[in-house]
Image: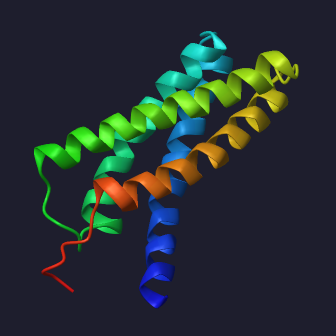
Amino acid sequence: MRRFGKEIVKFGIVGGSGVGVNFLVFNLLLHGLGAGPMTSTVLASSVAICTNYLGFRFFAYRDRSARSKRQIVLFFVFSGAGVAVESALFSLAYHGFGMDGPIGSNIAKALSIVLASAFRFLVYRTWVFQRDVHRR
């Protein structure tokens, strides 16, 4: 249980920095440069995924099996699925519930990130950064 608690804290640190990157890029694109809402959310999530990979690989899950092509492919496949989940939820809130102003769009983004992060946590720890059974 203690190891699981540490894992959640490390996931939260990396994820929190990724959320910061996600919001920064999202707001820069949508409210600063006038990009469309879906373009902004997808690009922001994609940039955050790239920074998160480094954090997960070298901090949160550094004790897990060594980096492999399989791990990298799985990370980006599941991250892409996470972006799809996050984008669908964002679209529902932004377009479906009229959360399209500066505050509403950020609330929609926050809710979509939280829900998609639960999905990411489960798939990253289960399939991407598997524990090496030979190491403890």
Is 103 left or right of 65, judged from the image as shown? Answer: right
Q: Which quadrant of the structure image shows residue 7?
A: bottom left
Q: Is residue 51 above or below residue 106?
A: below
Quadrant containing the C terminus is bottom left
x, y (%) of residue 106?
74, 34
At horizontal 37% and vertical 60% (from top left) the residue drawn is 126
Query: For residue 95, which quarter of the picture?
Result: top right
Please name the residue shown 27% across and 64% down the image: 130
Q: Position of residue 17 (x, y in %)?
A: 49, 53
Residue projecting furthest to the bottom: 2
Left or right of 116: which side holds 74? left
- Is residue 55 among the parts visible in the rendering? no
Q: How is the image coloured?
A: rainbow
107 w.r.t. 16: above or below: above
Answer with left or right where residue 116 lies relative to residue 107.
Answer: left
Residue 2 lies, with reference to residue 52, above or below; the image says below
User: Could you say which is closer to the camera, residue 76 or residue 33?
Assistant: 76
Left or right side of 64 for 127: right
How many marks are shown on the rendered structure?
Answer: 0
Q: What residue is shown at x 18% (from left), y 77% (from top)?
A: 133
- The x, y position of residue 92, in whole percent, is 75, 23
Q: Is residue 98 visible?
A: yes
Instruction: Choose top left, top right, bottom left or bottom right for residue 46.
Output: top left
**Residue extending farthest right:** 98
> Which one is nearer the viewer's eye here, 127 or 109?
127
